[in-house]
Image: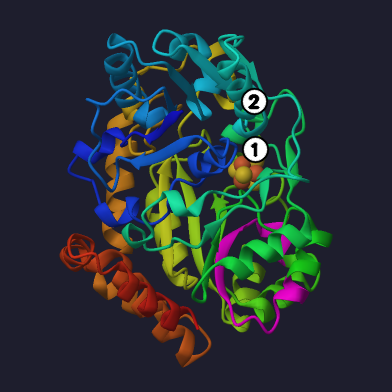
Amino acid sequence: MKIKFILPALEEAKSPYWRPIKYSLFPPLGLATLASYCDPGDEPEIVDEHVEELEIGDSPDLVVIQVYITNAYRAYEIADQYRSRGVFVAMGGLHVTAIPEEAKQHADVVFLGPGEECFARFLCEFKNKSHTNVYQSNDRSLVNGLWPRRDLFRRERYLVPNSLVISRGCVNRCDFCYSNSFYRDGRHFYTYRLDHILQEIESLPGRHLYFLDDHLFADRPLVRELFRQMRGMKRLFQGAVTVDSILRDDLIELAYQAGFRSAFIGFESLEKNNLTQVGKTSNLGRSYRDVIKRLDSLGIMINGSFIFGMDHDTKDVFRDVTYWALDHGIATATFHIMTPYPDTSLWKTLESEGRIICRDWKKYDTRHSVFRHPVMSCGEIEEGYHWAYREFYKWCNIRSGSRHHETMRMRWKHLIYAGCWKKFEPVWNFIIKNRMLCHARKILERTLQ
Ligand code: SF4
């Protein structure tokens, strides 16, 4: 059976903010994992529209589409075209789980929640012609979970083909996060077995790895043992961790010894009332300064994530956050405008207060303000957001930010990492066009070393 897995391009692909490198980072691991549940006689194919052309004149036996909020309209367009020719279309992903009624208008079957188990169940029933049209994920476990079919994506088209996810979900419950609603009906955090994780890591070529888990340190005993066993493997890796997980014990030192060199951290806000309001308990009562000092002294770079437009923000938030991040030597910053994704707690609160003013999913890209703020207009928030990005990534500020590290080595790493990431767009475009991302990966490895 021919099965075509499609990751439609985000709407952003047509906007002036489109950065090809941003969408040439990671292969579509979710779809590649579903593909591993196909039978040996099946012919699965994966098309990632961010890095390749999608041909929709074909007639596979089954099309499986992954839907995020910002690719939803494109996903529906692709699905409608296939269905108009009688091709069977299945859809799943965050947006489908959040608003299944919308997705059902464009699909023959929808998957709700994480896909592995329900996709396997559906596939079996589809082949027996006994399938239904909604599959809810019931049995959530990765104890015998399969790894992505890495042979099905084009490794050379991604800067970080060695990305992997060793868990699903998160142990925290932030109001604005998709994680809570996506994993709602069942277990909301579970992991692969340690021996499976080590086998997967050993199978990956090169040195660099990127753990795409929502929170890499969520299962501390597991990752403690993982890092112990990774010592001596000469890997270099990046991943997302929470503020509290860095300060708790010596796990971060073990991570460094295993090769951890760059941490994505959701600082979100400098204002305690905001953190309390959105339930970001992992940040409350913790010293951001201590987190930064500890990582800096080890030699781990920080990608800090910040949200603008929380209820306790004022017009000062853009300057305050930007200069705070620069003054604390944050190497790269990711700014977002607070966005209430459908079906999250934040969405429900704002909806009940009648504050959601835009339901155009294209605008739910964290660059637009889609709900009424107590003191700022949408225009002010969007303007402040763009100003923060421009200011943070000015060469003079990258230079001044880099001087806040203790060692010359970290200063150089900061300069090279931030500069390369944001200041050489035409070079990235050239690299992507000429299929030279493997060379760029070598530079990334050397910078992280
Ligand atoms: S810690 Fe991160 S992944 Fe976990 S619920 Fe909060 S925002 Fe989501």
**Residue 307 visible in the shown view:** yes
Q: Amino acid at mark 2?
A: Cys
On the image, numbered disc 1 is attached to which residue? 174
Could you tell me if the residues under marks 1 and 2 are in contact, i.e. CB atoms within 8 Å? no
Say left or right for 177 vs 392: right
Report the label total.
2
**Residue 377 visible in the shown view:** no
SS label for mark 1:
loop
* Residue 118 numbered mark, or none: 2
Say left or right for 324 vs 23: right
SS label for mark 2:
helix
**Camera-nearest residue between 68 and 172:** 68
Q: Gap between marks 1 and 2, in whole Å?
A: 26 Å
Q: Amino acid at mark 1?
A: Cys
Residue shown at 60%/37% (left/top)?
A: 37
- Residue 30 in picture, x, y percent from top left: 52, 41
> Which residue is at the far right?
221
Above/below status of 63 relative to 333 = above
Query: In which quadrant of the rendered view does residue 39 lie?
Result: top right
Q: Is residue 332 within the magenta segment?
A: no
- Residue 54 in picture, x, y percent from top left: 25, 36
Mark 2 Cβ inside 8 Å of ligand 1: no
Q: Is residue 244 within the magenta segment?
A: yes
Mark 1 Cβ inside 8 Å of ligand 1: yes
Query: Which region shows up in magenta?
Result: 227-246
**Camera-nearest residue between 70 and 165:** 165
Q: Nearer the viewer, mark 1 or mark 2?
A: 2
